[in-house]
Image (cartoon, rainbow, N blue to C red):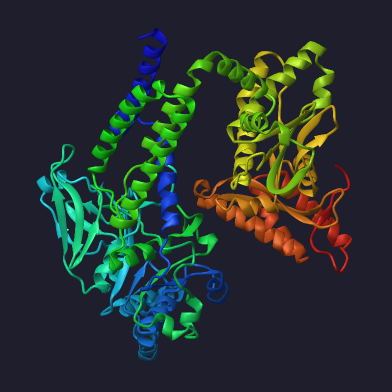
Amino acid sequence: MDIQRIIRYALSLLLTLVFLLHVGNIIHIPILTSLENQAYDARLKITLPENVDKKVIIIDIDEKSLEVIGQWPWNRNILAKINDALFDHYEITTIGYDIVFAEEDVDEGAKLLDKMAKGSLKDDPLFIEEYNQVMPSLQHDLRFAESLRDRKTVMGFVMDTDTKKGGLPTAITKLDKNILSKLAVNKTVGYTANLKVLQDSAYSGGFFNNPLLDDDGVFRRVPLLQTYENELHESLALALARVASGQPPIELVVETSDTYDLFLEWITIGELAIPVDHQSGILVPYIGRQKSFDYISASDVLNKIADKTKLQGKIALFGTSAPGLLDLRTIPLEPAYPGVEVHANIIQGILDGRILHAPGYTQGFEFILIIAIGILLTFTLPMLSALFSTLIIIGSILLLIGTNFYAWTSAQLVLPIASSVVLVVMLFALQMTYGFFVESRGKRRLAHLFGQYVPPELVDEISVKMEEISLDGEMREMSVLFSDVRGFTTISEGLEPKELTDYINAFLTPITKVIHDNRGTIDKYMGDCVMAFWGAPLDDKQHALHALNAAIDVVERMTPLRKEFSEKQWPEIYVGVGVSSGIMNVGNKGSEFRVDYTVLGDSVNLGSRLEGLTKIYGVDIITSEFTRHEVPEFEFRELDRVRVKGKKKPVTIYEPLGLLENISKSDRKLLKQFHIGIKQYRAQNWDAAEREIFGLSQLDPDRKIYKIYLDRIMHYRETPPDADWDGSFTHTSK
């Protein structure tokens, strides 16, 4: 046996060993986990049920309800009326609230009346009589609690928090500490629950947080059980399924395992058996994309104009699909899916007995399969021709996929597939490419060198499709970023040519790295200006988010860079960044001698103008209204409505402030005050606008935007705008 064949065998067996270590959870290979998740998602999409007798309906806090009833949270008298209507008029079976009512709904008028009744008017019989008649209508929580009482109402709450707030529902069972320690069910130390008066009045309760979220943030598994202080609590979906089934007791079916003394495999409620993993997690049995279940607007229920036939005898879930209320989840079928509909799918799946099962023994099955594949292909492929090797590999892959799909469809059994298929492909690739190692190494060097100028993804695409490259472009939804150094002309005049070159390279390098780290493509360097885009050559559904993250990272990277420049006695560096999103023309532009992969269009020009406006408004980053719309998870300060040079239609511009959850209440209050001031300004209520904005300028006199509006207000008082003024400001320079 020659040395080359021994090396081939050794490399193949080493590769097989790596896969075995991954399957045995000794090492973690993220790409295999990601591929397994994608394979699961693909099978789920292919096998979505065609006909489902939908037992669940969703009462939706939608945009229509927010417009008709008002912004959330609503007065709980309104919730009580909705609850009454659902049970009395629409005759639903049960309802679950995918919302936590942890704070009291206190009426300020009730506070005042109560103070008067206990104070100066306590001896006034007429007042006391009127007080006793009026107070019940002002005690909103009691009114809502009364509506919940003696009805099959299930209140949602959150477990695994840092607080102990509200009243927990009665646990389904209390476990002995010894038994609890043997279960892998998530053990929590805190909770955020509903007001005790509400929970005590409700029929039951269930949690709706998900500690089993996959690493990629996709809702594939959710737990049915969690514990707090040795007490077992059920999920909102399980609680509703139990209530709809007549409230049968929960029984746990467990087996022993090497990791835990008790390995949870099934949960039974009456005649229904629910397959779960050792953490009580179930694979969500999605029946389709968003709105697969009927959504009824909460305002239609309140006004009793909804179709009664859709609600009668159904299990209702009260939740929201409104993007502004941030109850959207990423699921295998789509990236923004209402959380309330996740519960609906689980309830439907439990009642239909349509829950997929991924039992613990599948890990052992995968381990044995990897060993068999590794040994068989390691010693077989080197003896076969390229044609026969290819046929063997194709047949192996088809056999693996076929048997896996059969187990899924016929036995509702989820067997792992990604590692075995990837191992087959990698063993084939290893054997077929071993002889070309030197050549492939040279190609990788070339790709690395060329990748300094364009993204590696484009290098691969060009190398594969060189004949297909043309100067034609295509229209895509994309985002573009422009970054420019403030005062660069002055800086360049104070540096020697060599120093200036070093200076430019010193800030272009970290900016380029930031853009590449955020999946962006460098379009071009224009002196001190950097232009980059997202959404091409590879499609990027989150192009606006990635562009905005890159803009923030660029600005943050300047802080340590200024320190480095100071040590070299170079001028300080500050940048302005503009980000714009919209339809752009992208492709290769140029001549027969040189092409440039670039973007064109109004949205691109707008991005350049926005970068220029950062100096005028005294901010580091400005985005367009179109970018803001694409990134709802960020908080923004509205700066102005402007007409930039070259555009007739006004566009609203914003300053990104950070993720919503990172913005403090005090900052939100100041931001709201500023936005009120802008609204008054556009309504030409100069005094009201000045009052709001002047107060802010006193708190933060260095913020330039306040002075801009105060100067404009002073100007417009003396020279009012035209009657058809739309509140915009026209910038005549770039």
Q: Nearer the viewer, residue 678 or 521?
A: 521
x then y, percent, for residue 37: 41, 44
- Left or right of 225: which side holds 679? right
Q: Nearer the viewer, residue 269 or 502?
A: 269
Residue under the point 72% across and 61% down: 689
Image quadrant in which you'd find residue 87: bottom left
Residue 192 appears anywhere in the view: yes
Residue 135 appears anywhere in the view: no
With respect to residue 653, does 32 lie above or below?
above
Residue under the point 49% across and 49% down: 661
Q: Nearer the viewer, residue 300 or 704?
A: 300
x then y, percent, for residue 481: 71, 39
Q: Quadrant of the N terminus?
A: top left
Image quadrant in which you'd find residue 181: top left
Residue under the point 31% across and 51% down: 407
With respect to residue 704, does 47 lie above or below?
below
Residue under the point 85% across and 32% down: 591
With respect to residue 305, does 62 lie above or below?
above
Q: Nearer the viewer, residue 579 or 682?
A: 579
Q: Quadrant of the C terminus?
A: top right
- Left or right of 161: which side holds 43? right
